[in-house]
Amino acid sequence: MGERLGWRVATEAALYGPEGFYRRPEGPGAHFRTSVHASPLFAEAVARLLCRVDEALGRPRALDFVDMAAGRGELVTGVLAALPADVASRARGYAVEVAGRPAGLDHRIEWLAEPPKGITGLLFANEWLDNVPVDVAEVDSAGVPRLVLVRRDGRERLGEPVSGPAARWLARWWPLPAEEGLRAEIGLPRDEAWAAAVATVGRGLAVAVDYAHSAGARPPFGTLTGFREGREAAPVPDGSCDITAHVALDACALPGGRVLTQRDALRALDISGARPPLALASTQPAAYVRALASAGEAAELTATGGLGDFGWLLQPVGIAAGTPDTPLDGLLVDVPDHEEQ
Ligand SMILES: C[S@@+](CC[C@H](N)C(=O)[O-])C[C@H]1O[C@@H](n2cnc3c(N)ncnc32)[C@H](O)[C@@H]1O
């Protein structure tokens, strides 16, 4: 209880150590709802994206789909089920997870601890980077950013001034004014984790989806939070809860990367949340009820103030994504600042 560690080391042990939160049998779905759990429409949209990548790649003989940080493999299961037969017959599904393979998972899905190297297709990481542990900096009374140290019970005190690559990352991506109490999460390990994941894509697209913020609009006190049984809780690094912090996706982006909102990404993938026409209610009541339920789910996935505000970081590798004659046209939009990176 007594030893104080930086948040990165403390979180690593709390989430992924032998008794870690993500090793538990119930899986993350028991503690919070991601877009994957919110609606099957999400997996269907990702399947449509995989089909667009397939076309951009010229319909390769084997098309890979990697569900990075797969939880219990819910997304890869849904994506494979939603593919049209001519694509499904060439698709290979992989789930990459720290936790063990769940019983009953489709035997065609390969369960791995690391992403396979040199894939041709789509690597999709939904709510992974927010769980890549980071250190936290806090400005002291002299205006100096210091590392925050934490005990297993969540009690904090300030440690050494932030220095080296972490200090350079802060200066570039999250400069802290000299005002006591301001805080920032040092996103460097996420930039590195994302770069390593993208490096496993031989040709295709890598996508990271997460709660995000960007330069100029960082939260002044950071976003480090706990989640336990569906509720927000104090972040305590004892393995009893999830520990998460929103992601500086603009810092993660590699050259050629683009960030857009989930709302825009899903609209580009034909999910709008529009209600069905009322006339359908009298002519085909059952179809109307189904369409209404589906519109409700789409509205949740694209909601302002909710999942719709999530960021999608799109990172094409070796495909001309975003040019007028490619199937990804319309999905990739420019992000101001990108050229500076
Ligand atoms: C918030 S859950 C998201 C699960 C799923 N992608 C979803 O959207 O429902 C984060 C998952 O990332 C996994 N994870 C974290 N770091 C990982 C890594 N380096 N490699 C594989 N899985 C990782 C955790 O074990 C956990 O299951």
Image (cartoon, helix red, strand yellow):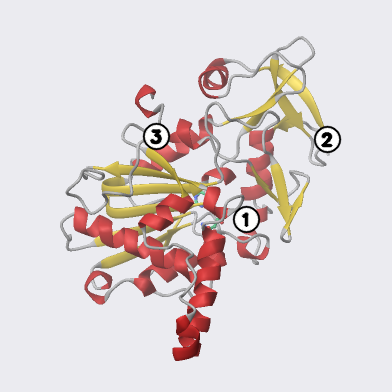
Mark 1–mark 3 Cα distance, whole angstroms, equals: 34 Å
| Circle count | 3
Residue 14 at what x, y percent from top left? Answer: 69, 46
Q: Is disc 2 placed on a helix, strand or loop?
A: loop
The three-letter code of the residue at mark 1 reads Tyr
Mark 2–mark 3 Cα distance, whole angstroms, equals: 39 Å
Q: Which residue does the image show at 73% across and 61% down from the upper left?
A: 229
The label shown at residue 22 is: 1
Residue 259 at what x, y percent from top left? Answer: 42, 40
Mark 1–mark 2 Cα distance, whole angstroms, equals: 22 Å
Residue 171 in the figure: left or right of residue 17: left
Residue topped by disc 2: 155
Relative to 136, does residue 289 appear above or below in the rendering?
below
Residue 283 at what x, y percent from top left? Answer: 44, 90
Comes first in the chain, label 1 or label 3: 1
Is residue 72 at least partly visible in the picture? no
Residue topped by disc 3: 335
Whether the residue carrying mark 1 lies under 8 Å from ligand 1 is answered with yes
Instruction: Pick whichever, 224 or 26, lies toward us.
Output: 224
Looking at the rendering, which quadrant does residue 100 occupy? bottom right
Looking at the rendering, which quadrant does residue 24 occupy? bottom right
